[in-house]
Image (cartoon, rainbow, N blue to C red):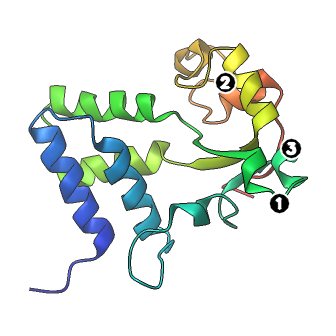
Amino acid sequence: MDKIQYWEIELRHIKLELDNNRFQHLRHFVDQYYCYKNGYIKRTGTADWEKIVWGENEAISEGAAKTQDRKLVVKEHIVPLKRITEELKKLVVNSTTEIHHIQECIEKYLFYATISKEEDKKLRNLKLTSKMPDEFDDSSHELFQDIYARYKLAGINLVQTKTS
């Protein structure tokens, strides 16, 4: 058997959790998957979540870009983990928990941003810290399926995005 990649192991962990209706540990496995898939690894071979904070492939807000003080910024899922979990649960309901379906779901929604704590307060004030706005699911709205919808509604400008 070929040596399996660590990110593939994390996908298998996620599959096991989904197949057994266990969702409380998904954050760990999803974050681990992302780190291994993107090469955010410590010298010891373990996932390095802190590399996401200032990662060159990650979204960074204007407010976060003005500081290098880790205590003044927040690393967060662009699409909240709660929403990602809901999407993964849909796979369970539809009996489509094959690895490739899980990976497609994660790849569609799993992105990170580093924002300032002040910008995080804007999300909190709009009650958008753990959910996407209604516009995200409204096919007639310009923010339909826009992963940056929360930031746009909160007036948080990203100076670096996953696609830039």
Badge 2 local density, few (<14 within 10 Å), some, or many (20+)?
Answer: some
Question: Horizontal and vertical percent for residue 18?
Answer: 17, 39
- Inspect the image, locate mark 1, and give the three-letter code of the amino acid beneath it: Gln
Q: Is residue 97 above or below residue 12?
A: above
Q: Is residue 97 visible?
A: no
Badge 3 local density, few (<14 within 10 Å), some, or many (20+)?
Answer: some
Which mark is on residue 68? 1
Which dot, 2 or 1, sits closer to the camera? 1
Which residue is nearer to you in this view: 147 or 38? Answer: 38
Dot 3 falls on a residue whose secondary structure is helix
Question: Horizontal and vertical percent for residue 111?
Answer: 55, 49
Which dot, 3 or 1, sits closer to the camera? 1
Which mark is on residue 63? 3
Q: Is residue 154 above or below residue 134?
A: below
Q: Separation of disc 2 and disc 1 at Cα?
A: 31 Å
- Inspect the image, locate mark 2, and give the three-letter code of the amino acid beneath it: Leu
Mark 3 vs mark 1: which is more N-terminal? 3
Question: Horizontal and vertical percent for residue 50?
Answer: 58, 62
Q: Quick check: marks 2 and 1 in contact, CB under 8 Å?
A: no
Residue position marked by numbered label 2 in the rendering:
143
Q: Is residue 85 above or below residue 39?
A: above
Horizontal side, residue 82 vs residue 160: left or right: left
Badge 1 local density, few (<14 within 10 Å), some, or many (20+)?
Answer: few
- Inspect the image, locate mark 3, and give the three-letter code of the amino acid beneath it: Gly
Dot 1 falls on a residue whose secondary structure is loop
* Quadrant holding the C terminus: bottom right
Q: Is residue 124 visible?
A: yes
Which residue is nearer to you in this view: 110 or 108? Answer: 110
Horizontal side, residue 42 vs residue 19: left or right: right
Which mark is on residue 134? none
